[in-house]
Structures are given as C-alpha cells and as structure tokens.
Image (spheres, rainbow, N blue to C red):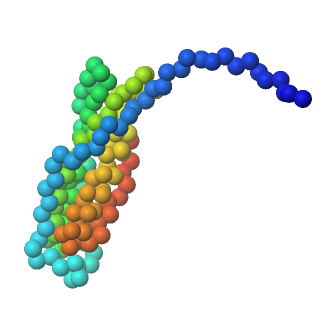
Amino acid sequence: MEKDQPNIEKQDVKPSGYKVESVLLLTSNFWRDINFDIQSYTGVNSKIDVKPEGHETTPEGKFAVTLTLKYEATYNSEDICKAEITMIGVFEKFGEPPLPDDKFKAINAPAIIYPFIREHLHNTCLKAGIGNVLLPTINFKP
C-alpha cells in the first residue's frame, strides 16, 4: 500500500551567499632578537592587534577584505620578536544573501582570513626557533 504523498510544488529558489575565491599573503615582516634563547625564558608576554578593512564591491559582485595582524612578544619589557602580517581575502557575492555586505566584510570575512594568519605566524615563529606561538581566537562581532 502506497502512502499518499503531498503535492509539493517546486519553487524557483536561486542560491545566494558569499563564496571565497582566494586568501593570499600580501605582506609579512618578521623580526626576532638574535640573542633570544627559548630555554632561558619563561612567562613571555604577547600582544596582538588585528585590523580588518573591507574594500568596494564591483558590479560583478566581487570584493576584497584585508586583515592585518601586528604581533609583539616581550620578556621583562625586552622585545623578543615582532611581526606584521597582511592577508587579503577575495570574495564573490551571489544572489541576495540575508547578511548585508558591510556585516560580512566586518565580521565573517575577517573570521575566514584570520586562521590563515595564525598559521603563518605559528610556522614563522617555529622556523625562527621561538617555539610554539598560538594566537587566541577572535570574535569579530562588535
């Protein structure tokens, strides 16, 4: 015996949202103290500053967001290392997503780019002999 199936009309729903096209490294500046020996330091203090910047959307729906991270590590007020990293995310808007462009550029796009910056700094610090540098997660909501 077959069950009665409801009559469902197909709706012409167009997908909408934002697509990540690429995340690229723009600049990477790193410095470390030549005398730094990770074995002799405990209690290193880290400071980060993160600045996102959204760029204009083209008529084709493409736009970019840059994210710059400034990182400083100190021990007893002596600089151990500094880094400034800027990455750019290229995105494409399709359809009419429920999230406005300005909110995506300020919150979602930086949250997509930030893990790439974290990974880049982590690997750079390992190669510089500084050890395991793990940046905290960031909530980009105001």
Q: Residue at x 13, y 67 (%)?
A: 32
Q: Quick one: quadrant of the N terminus?
A: top right
Front position in the image: 11 or 101: 11
Q: Residue at x 30, y 21 (%)?
A: 60
- Horizontal and vertical percent position of residue 124: 22, 63
Most distant residue in the front direction: 1
Q: Can residue 106 be seen here?
A: no
In the displayed structure, does residue 141 sit left or right of residue 121?
A: right
Q: Quadrant of residue 36?
A: bottom left
Most distant residue in the bottom direction: 40
In the displayed structure, does residue 127 sit left or right of residue 12?
A: left
Q: Residue at x 27, y 25 (%)?
A: 57
- Horizontal and vertical percent position of residue 58: 26, 23
Q: Quadrant of residue 120?
A: bottom left
Most distant residue in the left direction: 34
- In the image, is residue 47 above or below residue 33? above
In the displayed structure, does residue 59 sit left or right of residue 13?
A: left
Front position in the image: 33 or 75: 33
In the displayed structure, does residue 63 sit left or right of residue 6?
A: left
- In the image, is residue 30 above or below residue 93? below
- Horizontal and vertical percent position of residue 11: 59, 17
Query: Across the whole image, how many numbered discs are drawn on residues?
Result: 0
- In the image, is residue 21 above or below residue 79? above
- Horizontal and vertical percent position of residue 13: 54, 20
Q: Quick one: quadrant of the C terminus?
A: top left
